[in-house]
Amino acid sequence: MTMQNNLTVQALQWTGDTLRVLDQRQLPEQTIYDEYSDAAGVAKAIATMRVRGAPAIGIAAAYGAALSARRHYGAADWRQRVMDDIELLAQSRPTAVNLFWALDRMKTVLNQQLEQPLAAISACAEKIHADDIAANYAMGELGADIITGARGVMTHCNTGALATGGYGTALGVIRSMYRRNHIKVYAGETRPWLQGMRLTVWELAQESIPVTLVADSAAAWLMKSGAIDWIIVGADRIAANGDTANKIGTYSLAVLAKQHGVKLMVAAPTSTIDWKTSCGDQIEIEQRHQNELLAACYLKEGSVVSAWNPVFDVTPAELISAIVTERGAVLHPSEQSLRILKNESE
Ligand code: MRU
């Protein structure tokens, strides 16, 4: 490995020649890494959810572009071939903006006339990875400062090391908070793909952080019991006005939180903010195949039974108490207040 990452859980391992991807479909039963040496393989790994979670998708795609450059360098039209592979990677999933953000950065380096383009392209992917880990640690501390005094928190989906370069966004805040003060952590199961039950519970258990699993349908009753002060989630895309697309079920939790006086924190790196998208209505919501939801016995040709399977929803900014990024936190986000996080180049 060229990049040092001493975290226990690693979704992605870059060897310099290949990308090793932990197959998250097999967790928690089996820990299996698949090894990829071309962009097409990485695109498939993203589309089939071997690797998932917005920042991890972006990092994997960046390494996919680096693999493409290694493969095609030397051909007269190598840059065009890499651009074609970048286009293929961009089609792997539609909602997580980190994917397009990372590929744009790779395109910029690809189009520079450098003496050692291959080294520069690999270095760009490694930097995207390293910066994400650093951002997560920063967010962890900032988020923990905000929830000081909380006794219980609930999270949704998986936003930890598995979903990022390492440490995690929302789960990073929970990790940092747990180190300061042993709060009680609840994880929603996150139907239908069970990222909470299979991944978050497993990931926290690797570090002996106690976690209590709740059925998604138990969330309202949990809030009513008074056990949680905050819901802490990640994001796949944050619009310029603070509307946030995240795993399906986040919007339900936000509505329930309002009813019960529970606060909602979104923790995400600034690479998840899509400044070109003004509000949540403009975010494309991925629909996945109905066989992720329907029992096999209903999946017959010509069946009258079908399933509606949107895998993200949008929580309006007005239901969000805080958006935490590596550049700082914004309370009660709005188009105006979020601008403080914007760099001039964006
Ligand atoms: O479909 P997934 O598992 O890729 O969805 C993941 C989420 O919705 C996460 O909450 C989000 O990507 C943030 S991960 C730090």
Image (cartoon, rainbow, N blue to C red):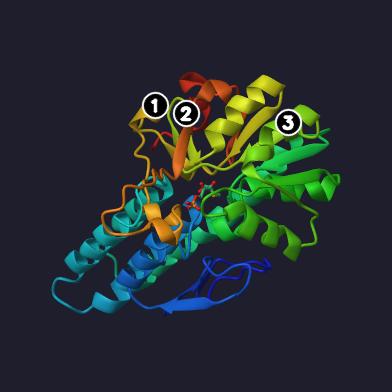
> The disc labelled 1 sits on which kind of residue?
Cys
Neighbourhood count class around disc 3 (C-alpha, 10 Å): few under 14, some 14–19, many 20 upward: many
The residue under the point 62% across, 54% down is 160
Neighbourhood count class around disc 2 (C-alpha, 10 Å): few under 14, some 14–19, many 20 upward: many
**Farthest right residue in view:** 181
Earlier sequence position, callout 1 versus callout 2: 2
Q: Report the residue marked by disc 1.
A: 279
> The disc labelled 3 sits on which kind of residue?
Met
Residues at discs 1 and 2 in contact (Cβ within 8 Å): yes
Residue 242 in the image, given as x and y percentages of width and height: 49, 28
Tag 1's secondary structure? loop
Which image quadrant: the C terminus? top left
The residue under the point 35% across, 66% down is 44
Q: Is residue 262 above or below residue 90?
A: above
Q: Horizontal placement of 282 versus 148: left or right?
A: left
- Kindly report which numbered mark, 3 or 1, lies closer to the viewer in this rendering: 3
Query: Which of the 4 quarters of the picture holds residue 289?
Result: bottom left
Q: Horizontal placement of 246 versus 298: left or right?
A: right
Does residue 58 appear in the picture of this structure? no
Query: Which of the 4 quarters of the picture holds residue 279?
Result: top left
- Label disc, if present, on residue 243 of the rendered structure: 2
